[in-house]
């Protein structure tokens, strides 16, 4: 394993990495974020994300997985005191084996591929980073091509979002946009190229139940804010709205659960259409 630097005190470099856990502005300024866990780090490497630094416990023998990463990934290597590494791992118990410092891609809607079978998700002003990560995980699982996070929202690269995605963040493009205008312009350009993407909002008073709507078409699914639902601007842009029939005492579903339900239905319809063309 190539030699690297050692960090045994809470020096300026350590404090900068620690700030990436809690300070969104510093993450954005640095253009990087922390990744913890075997699966997320492995997927970041597998999908070609820029790994700037790999930090490992200076006192611990490394597993074969960690040793191979340190040998093969072109990143700075840092041997760190275990108590400091535990802080970066955000765990109360032992320090993690590795923490990766990973570069952020550009927030460019062109990262999201739009084909004839396009399935995308837009999350309007989410307040929970955990919900963002959960939706990324579901979108990846059910064959979606990308996630858009719109407006004043929780951060895709917050550690809670990264953890909740269980590595799917690195397999599925997730793009942040400030307002509906950028998405409307992007979709207009797609439509001009012969890709008739429909904007379909989820709403408890939708035009029809989700299983009565044809989700085999190119579709961008819109999921509203956890408390207030879709904004007026997004509602106006929707081509259709669909509702999820629910029973019992529940008045609505959690945003991540609603997104997962509609994504599952889209996947089910598409599988059935291929089986019975």
Image: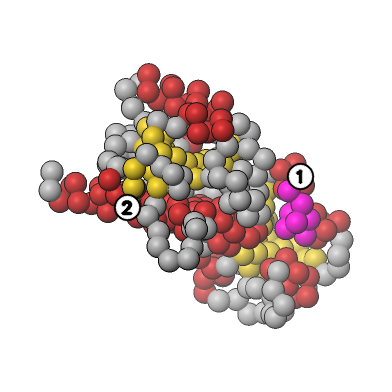
Secondary-structure class at tag 1: helix
Predominant secondary structure, magenta span: helix
Residue that lies at the very extreme toward the top in this rendered image: 192
Is 22 positioned to the left or the right of 47 in the image? Answer: right
Relative depth, front residue between 48 and 191:
191
Q: Which residue is mark 2?
A: 265
Q: Residue at x 86, y 65 (%)?
A: 10
Residue 7 on the magenta span: no
Picture disc at residue 25: 1
Relative depth, front residue between 232 and 221:
232
Question: Which quadrant of the figure contains the C terminus?
Answer: top left
Q: Nearer the viewer, mark 2 or mark 1?
A: 2
* Mark 2 and mark 1: Cα distance apart in space: 37 Å
Residue 20 on the magenta span: yes
Q: Position of residue 230 (x, y in %)?
A: 54, 40
Residue that lies at the very extreme toward the left in this rendered image: 276
**Residues packed near mark 1 inside 10 Å, few (<14), some (14 to 19) or many (20 plus):** few
Q: Which region of the structure is painted magenta? A: 17-24
């Amino acid at each position: 394993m190539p030699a690297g630097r050692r960090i045994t005190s809470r020096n300026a470099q350590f404090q900068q990495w620690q700030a990436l856990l809690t300070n969104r502005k510093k993450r954005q300024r640095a253009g990087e974020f922390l990744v913890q866990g075997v699966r997320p780090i492995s997927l970041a490497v597998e999908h070609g994300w820029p790994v700037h630094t790999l930090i490992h416990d200076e006192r611990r023998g490394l597993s074969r997985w960690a040793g191979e990463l340190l040998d093969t990934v072109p990143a700075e290597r840092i041997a760190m005191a275990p108590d400091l590494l535990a802080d970066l791992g955000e765990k109360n118990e032992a320090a993690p084996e590795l923490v990766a410092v990973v570069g952020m891609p550009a927030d460019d809607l062109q990262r999201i591929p739009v084909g004839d079978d396009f399935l995308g998700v837009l999350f309007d002003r989410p307040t929970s980073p955990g919900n963002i990560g959960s939706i990324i995980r579901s979108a990846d699982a059910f064959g979606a091509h990308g996630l858009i996070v719109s407006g004043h929202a929780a951060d895709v690269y917050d550690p809670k979002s990264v953890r909740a995605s269980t590595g799917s963040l690195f397999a599925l493009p997730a793009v942040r946009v400030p307002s509906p205008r950028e998405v409307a312009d992007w979709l207009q350009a797609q439509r001009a190229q012969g890709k008739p993407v429909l904007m379909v909002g989820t709403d408890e008073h939708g035009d029809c139940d989700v299983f009565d709507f044809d989700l085999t078409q190119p579709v961008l699914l819109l999921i509203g804010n956890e408390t207030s639902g879709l904004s007026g601007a997004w509602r106006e842009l929707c081509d259709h709205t669909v509702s999820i029939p629910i029973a019992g005492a529940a008045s609505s579903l959690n945003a991540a659960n609603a997104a997962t339900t509609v994504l599952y239905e889209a996947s089910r319809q598409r599988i059935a259409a291929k089986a019975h063309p």
